[in-house]
Image (spheres, helix red, strand yellow):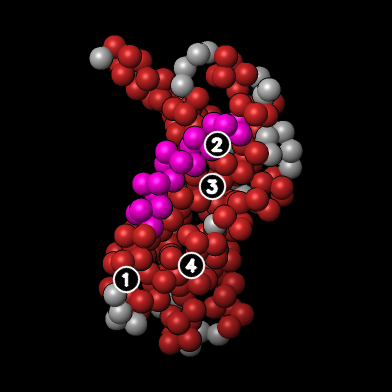
Amino acid sequence: MKEKSTVLNWFILVLFRDLILSFKRIATFMIPLVFFLIVITLFPLALGTENSFLSSLSSGVIWVSALLASLLAVESIFNEDFRDGTLDHFLLSGEPTFILVLAKVLAHWLVTGAPLLLACMISALFLFLPEALFVPLLVSLLLGTFLLSLLGALGGALTIGKTAILSAVIVLPLSIPVLILGVAVITNALNGLDFISYIYFLGALVAIGIPGICLATTEALLINYE
């Protein structure tokens, strides 16, 4: 029981530390949100304001924008701690590295992915998305953006100390299944077809990704430090 309590305290400590530091450098984490809103706004300006046309494109526009916006903060997951030596202390502390990775992924999602959920509700109005699609949109983005944070952590661990562009190059191909499933949820819901199965697939990817991708990220960190 004491060991479980220690692991939980370690998780909470890392999570709250990352959240506090994120609010101190809020400009870094506002960039993905602002980028997302700008991209969404540009589509009606470039393609016109015909309701049916924008609505048919909305699923792809929202998901591609969310994917690109999430990549902007990938470098910050580990690189800041790597540069100031904090990551060295974390890895030498003897605490489970898996818990460190999971806490950092959750912190990254809370400051980048969660605000995108609210922004997507605003973007749905710009793209004339029916109100009945708001719930499928939110659920798919909730699962999808967390998966993108997991993949972003893996890309950040593989390219620690290097440029953010390299992280994006690694993460983009891995994100294609998430993008396809996320677009399928909104498109099927828009056309009145079954979309629950695609949400189940996203949920299964999250269930597999939390242990699987976190372990892969842990190994990538340890390899970089050998």
What residue appears at the point 54 percent right and 38 percent down from the top-left corner?
216
Viewed as shown, does residue 83 lie left or right of 19? right
174 displayed left or right of 189:
right
The alpha-carbon separation of the residues under discs 2 and 3 comes to 9 Å
State the residue position of label 3: 151
Dominant SS in magenta: helix
Tell me, yes or no, if residue 131 can be seen here.
no
Earlier sequence position, callout 1 versus callout 4? 4
Stretch of the chain drawn in magenta? 202-221
| Precedes in sequence: disc 3 or disc 4 | 3
Whichever of labels 2 and 4 marks the residue nearer the N terminus, that label is: 4
Residue type for callout 4? Ile
Mark pair 1, 3: CA separation: 24 Å
| Residue in the image at 43% along x and 65% along y | 182
Check disc 3 and report its element: helix, strand or loop. Answer: helix
Q: Is residue 158 above or below residue 147?
A: above
Q: Of label 2 and label 1, which has the lower sequence position?
A: 1
Of the numbered discs 2 and 3, the one sitting upstream in the chain is 3
